């Protein structure tokens, strides 16, 4: 019975995804009709993310919060990174970074925070300096010095060629930090994972393009609050473009490669690199040890 129910859920999800993939592509008479669903489609479909089931606190036998880093240089993580140039792709294809920033700008995403403990909220205005950097070039400074009185009085306006403007886009993203919670549900007798927060890691706009630039946590988004938005946007499926996968499904099903860089601990949730200093191999081994410790708890439950 359980297998039958599982197959039904998988089939329903697959049908929902396939009907979304460039809707009306084969029936469109003009390019404007591509992606527009018919009235019958809009009425019949219920295209929403699968809701999380209610979990009572007393059903959680064991829980552990961990932080992971998703490196976008790894091939398996490319669906989160590409496309970086949106000029040569359709409107339906956007990177995860573009989806997040666009919806923060238009106000659809409001649960944005400065830290991963959700203490301080941020608005796009607070982050604007991180996204755009404007400075005067050396030639522009010479121009101002030579005609200082004219610029001061407003008789002359600095030409755009003397202005250096950098804007942060998806191409500069180096990875994502995620915060999640592993817990053992004693009612269902299995180990589960719940994604809590997501953070793009990137240099600030003024350092964009500099290979030696320091990266920063741009902002933290509370994941359960943005599931509907991430469900509306699709990541590219290299094996079958007719069946893209939503960013919500991709992240919830953990279809990415992440390395644990911190777990909650008695030492103020210190990072692995703080007690495994200057040794990348030991840091990687410690990350695997933490991962194995969580996995072992479930297997140990069935050993008597």
Image (tube, helix red, strand yellow):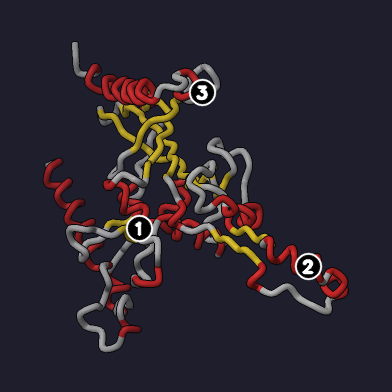
Is residue 164 shown left or right of residue 50?
right
Question: For the residue carrying disc 2, how many other residues have a C-alpha within 10 Å: few (<14), some (14-19), or many (20+)?
Answer: some
Between tags 2 and 3, which lies in front?
2
Q: Is residue 94 visible?
A: yes
In the picture, the quarter occupied by the C terminus is top left
Chain-order first, disc 2 or disc 3: 2
- Crowding at mark 1 (Cα within 10 Å: few <14, some 14-19, many 20+): many
Residue drawn at x 25%, y 84% as measured from the top left: 28
Pointer 2 residue? 144
| Residue at x 12%, y 46% (from the top left corner) | 4
| Label 3 sits on residue | 270
Q: Is residue 227 above or below residue 33?
A: above
Mark 1 or mark 2, which has the lower sequence index?
A: 1
- Which x, y percent locates residue 195? 40, 40
How much space separates mark 1 and mark 2, taking CA atoms? 41 Å
Q: Nearer the viewer, mark 1 or mark 3?
A: 1
Cα separation, mark 2 vs mark 3, equals 49 Å
> Which of these two is toward me, 198 or 53?
198
- From what the image shows, is residue 190 above or below residue 13? above
Decide if residue 290 is in sight here: no
For residue 78, side relative to residue 199 (left or right): left
> What SS does tag 1 mark?
loop
Task: Name the residue nearer the viewer: 238 or 27.
Answer: 238
On screen, residue 131 versus residue 245, left or right, reads right
Task: Please name the residue shown 22% across and 83% down the image.
Answer: 27
Which residue is label 1 attached to?
A: 82
Up-down relation of residue 157 to residue 276 (above or below): below
Place residue 53 in its image quadrant: top left
């Amino acid at each position: 019975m359980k297998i039958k129910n599982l197959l039904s859920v998988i089939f329903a999800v697959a049908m929902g995804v396939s009907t979304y993939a460039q809707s009306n592509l084969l029936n469109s008479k003009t390019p404007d009709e591509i992606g527009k669903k018919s009235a019958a489609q809009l009425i019949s479909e219920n295209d929403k993310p699968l809701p999380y089931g209610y979990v009572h606190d007393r059903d959680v036998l064991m829980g552990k919060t961990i932080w992971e880093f998703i490196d976008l240089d790894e091939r398996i993580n490319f669906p989160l990174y590409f496309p970086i140039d949106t000029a040569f792709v359709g409107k339906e294809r956007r990177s995860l970074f573009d989806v997040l920033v666009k919806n923060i700008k238009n106000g659809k995403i409001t649960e944005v925070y400065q830290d991963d403990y959700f203490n301080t909220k941020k608005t796009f205005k607070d982050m604007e300096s991180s996204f755009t950097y404007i400075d005067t070039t050396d030639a522009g400074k010479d121009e101002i010095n030579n005609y200082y009185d004219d610029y001061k009085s407003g008789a002359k306006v600095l030409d755009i060629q003397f202005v250096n403007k950098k804007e942060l886009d998806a191409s500069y993203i180096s990875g994502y930090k995620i915060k999640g919670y592993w817990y053992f549900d004693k009612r269902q007798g299995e180990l589960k994972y719940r994604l809590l927060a997501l953070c793009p890691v990137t240099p600030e706009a003024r350092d964009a393009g500099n290979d030696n630039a320091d990266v920063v946590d741009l902002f933290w988004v509370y994941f359960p609050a943005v599931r509907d938005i991430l469900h509306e946007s699709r990541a590219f499926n290299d094996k079958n473009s007719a069946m893209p996968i939503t960013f919500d499904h991709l992240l919830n099903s953990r279809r990415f490669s992440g390395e644990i860089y911190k777990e909650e601990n008695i030492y103020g949730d210190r990072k692995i690199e703080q007690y495994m200093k200057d040794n990348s191999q030991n840091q990687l081994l410690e990350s695997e040890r933490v991962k194995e410790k969580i996995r072992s708890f479930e297997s140990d439950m069935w050993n008597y």
